Amino acid sequence: MAQSKRYSERASAHTNPTAIRLFQIMERKQTNLSVSADVTTKAELLRITDAVGPYICCLKTHIDILSDFDHDLIDQLTALAKKHDFLIFEDRKFADIGNTVKLQYSSGVHKIASWSHITNAHIVPGEGIVKGLAEVGIPLQRGLLLLAEMSSAGSLATGEYTLEALRIARRNKEFCIGFIGQRRLEGLIPVEEKEDFIYMSPGVGLTSKGDGLGQQYRTPREVILDSGCDVIIVGRGIYGSGDTVENAKTYQKAGWDAYLERIEKGRK
Amino acid sequence: MAQSKRYSERASAHTNPTAIRLFQIMERKQTNLSVSADVTTKAELLRITDAVGPYICCLKTHIDILSDFDHDLIDQLTALAKKHDFLIFEDRKFADIGNTVKLQYSSGVHKIASWSHITNAHIVPGEGIVKGLAEVGIPLQRGLLLLAEMSSAGSLATGEYTLEALRIARRNKEFCIGFIGQRRLEGLIPVEEKEDFIYMSPGVGLTSKGDGLGQQYRTPREVILDSGCDVIIVGRGIYGSGDTVENAKTYQKAGWDAYLERIEKGRK
């Protein structure tokens, strides 16, 4: 089981270049924290990113909420990713047919595929969405996460829908490196062949319980230890109030401690 | 049943300002055609829009695939919408939690809510997505379509998922004016109260059967007469080959004839 292995061990056995880099960064920096910086100006995004950079494995962006987006922002984000050693994950949640998502991923003002190591997609349009994105992403050695579950109230990504995400990912392993979800899924449909999907889990908070628009929170320990996910995604818990750097350190430690406890438990 | 009424009659009885305008335009211009202009430059989009403008009720855009998007484009599109009397529908397929879609709809480079009369959303995140979008859209008198079904192969928007779209729309009628779908849904869960949802159907073509990335096509007659939808959305069938204006006229007539046949049938 992937969840009882160290991130470094999983890096050695993986075949997708982005998945390998992510595992290596996680082990090197001892962090499974991804910060979701949902701010609307370039200055705020760069300030938060530079502050949390040393403590994260991955920066999650919503590039389309930045009112002053420009190519200099991408240059600066890319420079910060090198300086602090993290990957960039554009949380685009692609959700259209294959022909359209190809264009949305490669083109437009944002040119997501050119700078974002990881992106994600809903499977509701069917497998064509993955095929379309893969045509753009594989040549660039990118990785895709499928939305298997969501953390919001009343999410319809449950049951058979979630299982279908697993099936589609298994059929597209060259590009699909994992899932956005609440728990590991592999046990739900056993397979013979070796596989190692990365599970990133949003809706993580140490204190807050919700946001009034349906978002629900779980703790890092619940996400990493109890549910076997690999990366905690924290947004407003980091930059919403208090000291951003101290918050990032707190979540980094909480996530890493839960991971070490999981590895220890797996040894027994 | 809405499908046996004239668009003009439905305009008089509706309460959402965007739905009323759409029905009035359809009747005035005798068209239920929406053109989906999936091109990647401003010049192409403006050229196609000016050419098809007289024959459409609604222009469907993917603003995020335009590499040279700028505010002048919005000014020009808005001017063309006035000149030719059509609405603009940004096919954004919002698919995130409420707090995020609020920002994606109102902010960023594209500021969709400021110019797009209609937009659409997936319901997979749960009802919070509609609540989030409504906070932005209702004050601007916009309309939202929910994706109840998709035209791509292996779509997971079926069965209980589709019914949930209907339930969510019924609970949010001030803002949800209808659906992207393949057929009318109201009979699936009968209600007492008066309602009139607009059904827009993509994947319409007179000749082609598919695109190799999972898109599947139906004819205007199947969509309007057999399935009771209100608006046909045609993309590559209009500007993919041949004369764009002649193609638009052909689809306009096919869609309108099917509508007249439907009204006639409803009288019997």
Image (cartoon, coloured by chain):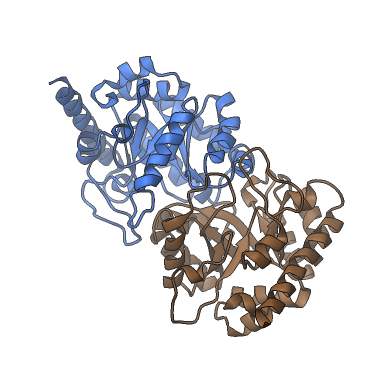
Chain colours: A brown, B blue
Q: Residue furthest left?
A: B268
Q: Nearer the viewer, residue B95 or A17?
A: B95
Residue A208 position (above or below residue B186): below
| Residue at the image point whose x is 68% and y is 61% from the top | A222
Counting from the top left corner in percent of width and height, residue A47 is at: 81, 53
Q: Nearer the viewer, residue A216 or B73?
A: A216
- Identify which residue, A26 or B23, lies in the foreground: A26
At a point 49% along the width and 44% down the height, the residue shown is: B92
- Residue A37 visible in the picture: yes
Q: Quadrant of residue B27?
A: top left
Q: Quadrant of the C terminus of chain B?
A: top left
B9 to the left or right of A200: left
The percent position of residue B173, horizontal first and vertical second, equals 46, 27
- Residue B37, horizontal then vertical, whole percent: 40, 44
Quarter holding the N terminus of chain B is: top left
Q: Is residue A160 left or right of residue B112?
A: left
Q: Nearer the viewer, residue B126 or B144?
A: B126
Question: Residue at the location (60% across, 31% down)?
Answer: B135
